[in-house]
Image (spheres, grey):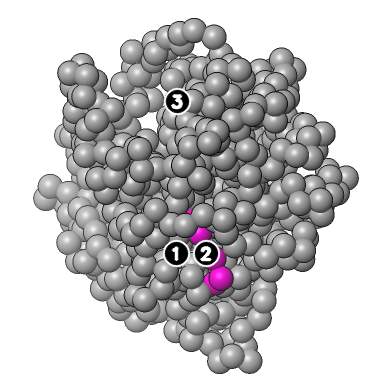
Amino acid sequence: MSRIINLLFGVHAHQPVGNFPEVMEDAHQRCYKPFLETVHRYPDFKFALHSSGWLLEWLFTHHPDDMMLLREMAARGQVEFFGAGDMEPVLAVIPYRDRMSQLAAMSDRLEQYFGQRPEGAWLTERVWEATVVPALADSGIRYVMVDDYHFLCAGAERAQLSGYHTTEEDGRRIDVYPISEALRYRLPFSPAGEAVAYIESQAEETTGAAAIYFDDIEKFGIWPETYSWVYERGWLKNFIEGVLASPAIRSTHIRDHHNETRTRGIVYLPTVSYSEMGEWTLPAPAARRYAELVHAAEHEGVLERDRPFIRGGIWKNFLTRYPEANWAHKRMLALSARLAALPEDQVRQDLVELLHESQANDAYWHGLFGGIYLPHLRRALWHAMIQLERRLDGLQPRPALATGDIDLDGREEVFMSSLALQAVVRPDKDAALIELSSYTLAQNFADTLKRYEENYHEKARAGSLAAREHEGEGIASAHDVVRFKHEIVAADLIPDIRTRGLFAESWTDFGQKLPVEYATTFIQGGAVLCMGQAGETRVAKIYSVRDNVLSVAFKCNGSGRLSTRLNLAIPCCDGPAGCFVVKGAVAGGFGQYFVWDDLADLTLEDHYLGGAIHLHASLPGRIKAQPHFTVSQSEAGFEKIMQAVELTLTWEVDGAFEVHLQLEVAQLKK
């Protein structure tokens, strides 16, 4: 009997909800279009494709001709479509009811576009929890793709991983395929001939043996160096021709392999994602210790054997690492519950679609890609949530003042809302606003991000040109190279100690600057009163909301300087569409540094958003404005990203002092 290996080849295409149009277009021209054109020339090369719903919709709208190629390949049986959550959520972190609606929306979309209802599903970031099995099975999904690493973490041997296994949860069964890490790291980075030879080396006399590849299509053109390598230098063409010419390789659909072969047996997988994710989910000190363990195992020559047991954190750790992500996630869950509680005749498709958009995974986490560090991705989540909340309020109004421990931190946040505005106070030591949402503009002006210590900042401090030299032929993976998009200095990497919300106060006297720490927060007559202290000086802060105006009053008695800091998330950031307006004249852009003395009025205009913030103080003082940047990594290198406009307002105090601020959110006149 001849030795044969079934090549199960699949690619996953995704762009985050809310990504920039120019980024989408670049991705299409460098990756999606040439990939489809190349595989279209080889009808016998079978492949699987998963594309997130938002990306598919964009492609059909902007590049229908290329989608016709895909339809043609579907009609001739060349491509198998994989399902998933429609807006690419991590299924494990949304409720069962939303898993079902997300999976159904994607299956319906594929049936509408291509006449194919999926039997297999892609798991976002390969995040596996057994709790997702019932929804997958109940949605008609028969098999999913995970990493071989998932199996190794369960104690499996690599020799067992050339086929699928079966698992169950709550009485529902699903089959799981192990994606080969060895193939993920070879395709498309090693020469095509070497990749084909490696697949041939996996051939067995056993019927149904499979080499399983399913990974990001963006590695075929978007990752650094890959466009030239994959298309101009012919890697993909050479790889496909090598596969089709090989007597040992059978190009096979996953659905056919699943129908023609039997399960390799029962398996129960731990809660895990791919191995890199285990490191990314850890806070910096733990990530450093993890890296030390990996390095020690590598030095001792046992890393390949022991890596499944040197495991990092789980995906949900991101919700503990980044309170900003946790707040968005818990707000999303609360809106999901409100939508689910509506009478059936009030549930509309537009409400469900907004909820689905708010569950898109990208802005909830961070690894090799920008993720939560990218303001436009977070803004897309909040844009959907704010619109959904406004529409739910129209169906079932809420009280103007409400409390609840939404983020599960042991403190009850205070919600103040009108038809135009919502402000949320977190009653911790800063008693700052963690949300300031305009229903008119669908913008959360408190949606910023602190500077966090990240483990990879050590590479930025060292300023090394490469984390690891690439050896041999081929190209380096984005995991292996350190690049710099911007100049990074030591001061850029100092983590924040205090919140980056709105209205965090400091008190200065005798040259000493102290934070005002609030110990008591309570509701009084439609307002929120916060009582704090800095040294011997007591400070009262009072919040209220009316129409489109947030009012904040400060009262204290002493001799010194009172300062309050606001970090305002402005969509255009340091782009050309935003500017400060002082005394009727444009002073400059949000990316610049300014100090204005004896100023009571300041306007921030964002023509990209079509809105403005008018800040008025009852007493003039000093206003300092500067951009707030963070440093993060992406596949393109280390970069500084503007997160917010940081305003610091300061008043001289001598005796009894009281100042009132008004922050008015308005639409710009066209």
Q: Residues within 10 Å of mark 1 (few under 14, many from 20)?
A: some
Q: Is residue 88 above or below residue 525?
A: above
> Earlier along the polypeptide chain: callout 2 or callout 1?
2
Residue closest to the far front:
1
> Which residues fall within the magenta stretch?
139-144
Q: Say what secondary structure mark 1 lies in.
A: strand
Residue 139 is situated, as x and y percent measured from the top left of the image, at: 54, 72
User: Is there a contact, CB below 8 Å, between mark 2 and mark 1?
Assistant: yes
Asked if the residue under mark 3 is in contact with the one under mark 1, i.e. CB atoms within 8 Å, the reply is no
| Distance between mark 1 and mark 3 Cα atoms | 32 Å
Query: Left or right of 529: which side holds 666?
Result: right
Label 2 SS: loop
Give left or right: position of 546 versus 238. Answer: left
Work out which residue is located at the far right of the displayed protein and give it.
65
The residue under the point 27% across, 49% down is 154
Location of residue 302 (image quadrant): top left
Residue 347 belongs to the span the image colors magenta: no
Q: Which residue is mark 1?
A: 174
Read off the residue under disc 3.
479
Sort mark 3 into few (<14), some (14-19) or many (20+) by Cα contacts within 10 Å: few
Instruction: Give me the residue at 50% from left, 74% from top.
Output: 138
The dot on residue 142 is 2
Residue located 35% across and 70% down the image: 169
The amino acid at mark 3 is: His
**Sequence-wise, which precedes: disc 1 or disc 3?**
1
Which image quadrant for residue 410?
Answer: bottom left
Q: Amino acid at mark 2?
A: Arg
